[in-house]
Image (cartoon, helix red, strand yellow):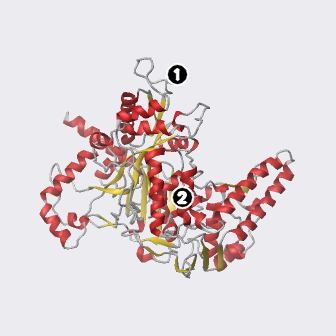
Amino acid sequence: MKLLAMFGLMLAVLAAVAYLDDPPTRAELVFVNRSEVFTLDPQRMSWLQDFRIAYALYEGLVRWDNKDFSIEPAAAEWTLSEDRLSYTFAIRPDARWSNGDPLTAHDFIYSWRRAILPDTAADYSNMFFVIRGAEEFFRWRADALDKFVAANAQLDPDTRAANALDLWEETIARFEETVALKALDDRTLRVTLVHPTTYFLDLVAFGVFHPVHRPTVEGWQVDEATAAKLRQFGWSHLSPPSFANRRFVKINSATGRLEQKHGWTKPKHLVCNGPYVLTQWRYKRGLRMERNASYHSSQRVHSASIECVSIEDTNTAILAFESGQIDWLSDVSAEYQADMLAQRQAYEQRYAHRIQAMLAEGRSLDDALAALPKPQAGERRNIHVFPTFGTDFYSFNCRPILAGGRVNPFADPAVRRAFVMSVDRDAIVQQVTRLNEPVATTLIPPGSIPGYQSPAGLKYAPSDARAELKAAGWEDRTGDGLVEDEQGRPFPVVDLLYSTNTPRYKNISIVLKDMWQRELGVRVELRGKESKFFKEDLITGNFMIGRGRWYGDYGDPTTFLDLFKTGDGNNDRGYSNAYVDELLQRAARETDPQRRMRILEECERFLFAEEVPMLVLCQLVQLYMYEPAKVTGLSRHPRLTQYLWQMKVRDP
């Protein structure tokens, strides 16, 4: 039996190592992303694993200090006007693209325009609406595209194509006239806001505000002489080629939209301005980055090469780590993770006094652990857990009509309240996840934002839940244990969607199904999908209840509350409420910081005491695997931003 077990372990390790086959040489730092990188286009990013790579390939005007999340210069220094409305960024003279072209103010204007254009379908377009004229431009362009389709549907193809180009030229002119982004010269950018925004620099540090290289994004086909001018002056001093000579963009003559192909993000094309350049990207296997020779601050870059390996199966990922093939496992979600944490606790308990003494001396926890003897049998020190700036939840589809045309019972807030109040969160974190995460009834992690007081949401109350469902017209009228409406029709079978990349959500979904069937008398069917297709169903509204999680992108309540704004790109629930929209607008106009926080507190109270567009379960905790004696440079701040260029693997 022992031989069979050892043979099975060897096969598992070989399976893990198969993900790492044929690298040129082992990268200095190798880590695992549990999910595949969706895109390397920063304006289209919305997932944590994408942004992690973005902060290695691209550099914004400013960055976070990820120890305390203060703001520091990156590609530029800044000044703020006395009225707190205008920021002027002076781009450092040695900032260049990886192909040698100068980084200019025009690069940021072009990139931010991409994010604002509805054509791009960016999830974070609304973040740019703090810039004067940005929202007006977005609305104008969206309306113009709708009118274009109606006005040109019956025209011949040549006329439609000419009209589409005319609309594009009008769009560029409208942007320059409307949106308060100005290049005072090639290295100076002026940004004017709608109103003073205390967290604006925090936004600018976020990945969607990072620049892209226009000739690369559009696929300009240029000769050597033009390429030389680009390297000397930048693209803004040249007339762009016709769309016929732009490989990756075109104007769709039927819709009038700018359409983007994504081949420019491949290794042989991608030009970037961050600490690293992309040298390899293999779908569902991983990518490799090497130090960018053109980066202005090479002394910041601790590892010459980095390999990001995609391993969706958590057990395989752990085996790859344990076998020494992986230096950092960025997400641990194995079913036995609670047992691993118990082993870590046993190790800490044995050395509790020594750890406390070293912490009192000002040493970090990782340094303290690294100074201790290696773990004994039944102990470990390579698993790490801490609360994050994120929340675990299940979204209700709030649209009146479901995909396929059926009436949606979850469009009624009373039904949503019933489903929320019939869930025992404590049982889930203690018996299902076994991580004892802090349970939550509202979305913003309590105490995570200075000056913000979290309101109370709906707690576990099964009898109140049944009363809510009855008030919505659903009760057991036949005595069969299932609820029906007044016409005797049973409550629709609840479609519960979850992602299969981790056992966590399958296990939670099973328990939710049991709770809802037992407490409410409804039928629930589980539907698991892998990450890519799961996300597609969320975006298109093809679900009734779907698992979700959200990490705040910047240090303000709106990074969570904007999820409920009508039309927001991350509003997968399709939720819309005039009072919520009005509160968010009032908060945006409010210049007094304390009054603004009170408005946002009322917004969250209304959302989670009355409307409940989602069932919030708990504050997320993050589990990493790394040896503290080996890997340095990881931040323990709850904002969960890790800069790969800060990380280093010590020599054994």
Q: Can residue 161 be seen in this view?
A: yes
**Is there CB contact under 8 Å for labels 2 and 1?**
no
What amino acid is labelled 1 in the image? Arg
Where's the N terminus, which quadrant?
top left
Crowd class of label 1 (few under 14; some 14 to 19; many from 20; radius 10 Å): few
- Side of 628 relative to 235 (left or right): left
Other-residue count near label 2 (Cα within 10 Å), few / some / many at <14 / 14–19 / ≥20: many
Residue 622 x/y as whole percent: 34, 54
Q: Which of marks 2 and 1 is nearer the N terminus?
A: 1
Q: How far apart are marks 2 and 1 (CA)?
A: 39 Å
Camera-side residue of 16 and 499:
499
Say what secondary structure mark 1 lies in. loop
Q: Position of residue 282 (x, y in %)?
A: 50, 52
- On the image, numbered disc 1 is attached to which residue? 489
**Residue 457, which numbered label?**
none
Q: Image quadrant for the C terminus?
A: bottom left
User: Image quadrant of residue 403?
Assistant: top right
Asked if residue 59 shows in the view, the reply is no
Asked whether 505 or 157 is in front, the reply is: 505
- In the image: residue 284, left or right of residue 649: right
Above-or-below relation of 484 to 248: above
Numbered badge on residue 584? 2
Residue at left offset 19%, top offset 36%: 2
Amino acid at circle 2: Leu
Where is residue 62 shown, x and y percent of the image?
Answer: 50, 73
Foreground residue among 159 and 175: 175
Q: Residue at x 57, y 72 (%)?
A: 97
The answer to whether residue 323 is above or below residue 129 is above
> Is label 2 in a helix, a strand or a loop?
helix
Dividing the picture into quarters, in which one does residue 178 lie? bottom right
Q: Quadrant of residue 306?
A: bottom left
Compared across the picture, whether 230 is left or right of 395 comes to right
